[in-house]
Image (cartoon, helix red, strand yellow):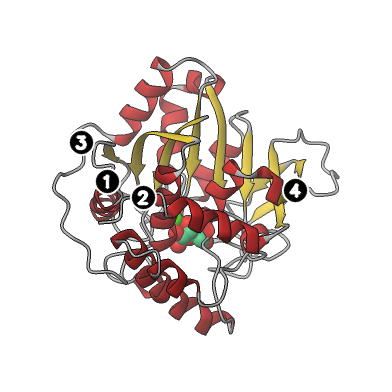
């Protein structure tokens, strides 16, 4: 059983990740924290509420966090995710808002209250909230079981610049704090997610689930693929953030190596690059399990669809 806090910026692929985590009997979602990323933090919090309510998990609380990265301006990407961040489905308005408490406060309190080594963080967005929590209460580092994040790319390069992936580029200083925190980390970078594009025509398979969740997923997938397929010339796209949840649930489907990883925060051309010491040439300590491949993407998406089918039919 994985007890998790999900830090996210929905985002269609974040929405899939949340739905997958909520559907899985092996994951207990203690709460959802949101951050400025794909869209503003107000919008990511509202999106998270809509997603939880669609999944029949309106009882899970949402906490809005940082409005911008630590040293840099926010960098929303409506050209990728649409004006709402979760375009592709006609979402019902959320019945409830985010909690009044700040995400960083709630994260710190929760990690200090729950048994040490029990709670993992799934980080699917710029890592501002995590970094602020680690600075605010460094003692949480020794209590977090594991951080599984989606971000970075080494063998694949970046998706926002030749060197940098979105989540790391937006707040490289935050990612550097997280990677140097001493917490056990599993990275799901572009190297891994690009090895696992969704099956062509997956939208129709999701719609065939016959539920609103299935229809919402089908619509979001179609929207998400439009931009990506045009940019990459591919027939389908990987659901990056959902793959990170898949990596937590099904390590048998992934290959990687523990090695030292650090972040370039000041490069002329490479700001936001995840510098992976794959050959262990720096003498630095291994701080991260870097997932390089998904070994069976067909099986990965089959399992995801099977999990999504557990969510309510309405
Ligand atoms: C990451 O960037 C965001 O736009 C996605 O939601 C995902 O977290 C992929 O590079
Ligand atoms: Ca995301």
Q: Is residue 191 left or right of residue 136?
A: right
Quarter-of-image position of residue 74 = bottom left
SS for callout 3:
loop
Alpha carbon of mark 4 to alpha carbon of mark 2: how far? 31 Å
Q: Is residue 150 visible?
A: no
* CB under 8 Å between discs 3 and 4: no
Q: Which residue bears the numbered disc 4?
A: 256
Query: Which residue shows up at 51% across the image and 84% down it?
Result: 230
Between residue 41 and residue 110, name the one nearer to us: 110
Q: Earlier in the sequence, mark 4 or mark 1?
A: 1
Distance Cα–Cα, label 3 vs label 2: 24 Å
- Disc 3 designates what residue? 99
As helix, strand or loop, the secondary structure at mark 1 comes to loop
Tag 2 near tag 1, CB within 8 Å: yes
Q: Position of residue 24 (x, y in %)?
A: 46, 42
Residue 298 rendering spot, x and y as whole percentages: 64, 64
Measure the alpha-carbon separation of dots 2 and 1: 7 Å
């Amino acid at each position: 059983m994985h007890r998790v806090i999900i830090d996210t910026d929905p985002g269609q692929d974040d929405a899939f990740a949340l739905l997958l985590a909520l559907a899985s009997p092996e994951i207990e979602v203690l709460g959802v924290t949101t951050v400025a990323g794909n869209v503003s933090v107000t919008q990511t919090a509202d999106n998270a509420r809509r997603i939880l309510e669609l999944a029949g998990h309106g009882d899970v609380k949402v906490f809005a966090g940082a409005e911008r990265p630590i040293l840099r301006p926010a960098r929303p990407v409506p050209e990728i995710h649409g004006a709402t961040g979760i375009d592709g489905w006609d979402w019902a308005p959320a019945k409830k808002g985010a909690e009044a408490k700040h995400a960083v406060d709630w994260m710190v309190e929760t990690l200090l209250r729950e048994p040490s080594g029990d709670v993992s963080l799934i980080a699917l967005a710029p890592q501002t909230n995590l970094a602020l929590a680690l600075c605010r209460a460094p003692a949480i580092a020794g209590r977090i079981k594991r951080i599984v994040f989606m971000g970075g790319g080494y063998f694949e390069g970046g998706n926002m610049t030749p060197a940098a992936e979105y989540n790391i580029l937006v707040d490289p200083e935050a990612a550097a704090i997280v990677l140097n925190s001493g917490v056990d980390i599993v990275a799901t970078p572009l190297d891994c997610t690009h090895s696992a594009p969704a099956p062509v025509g997956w939208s129709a398979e999701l719609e065939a689930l016959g539920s609103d969740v299935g229809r919402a997923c089908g619509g979001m997938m179609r929207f998400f693929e439009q931009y990506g397929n045009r940019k990459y010339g591919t027939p389908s796209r990987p659901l990056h953030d959902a793959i990170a949840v898949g990596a937590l649930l099904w390590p048998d489907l992934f290959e990687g190596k523990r090695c030292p990883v650090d972040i370039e925060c000041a490069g002329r051309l490479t700001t936001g690059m995840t510098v992976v010491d794959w050959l262990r040439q720096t003498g630095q300590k291994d701080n991260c399990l870097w997932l390089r491949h998904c070994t069976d993407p067909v099986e990965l998406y089959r399992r995801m669809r099977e999990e999504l089918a557990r969510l309510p039919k309405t």
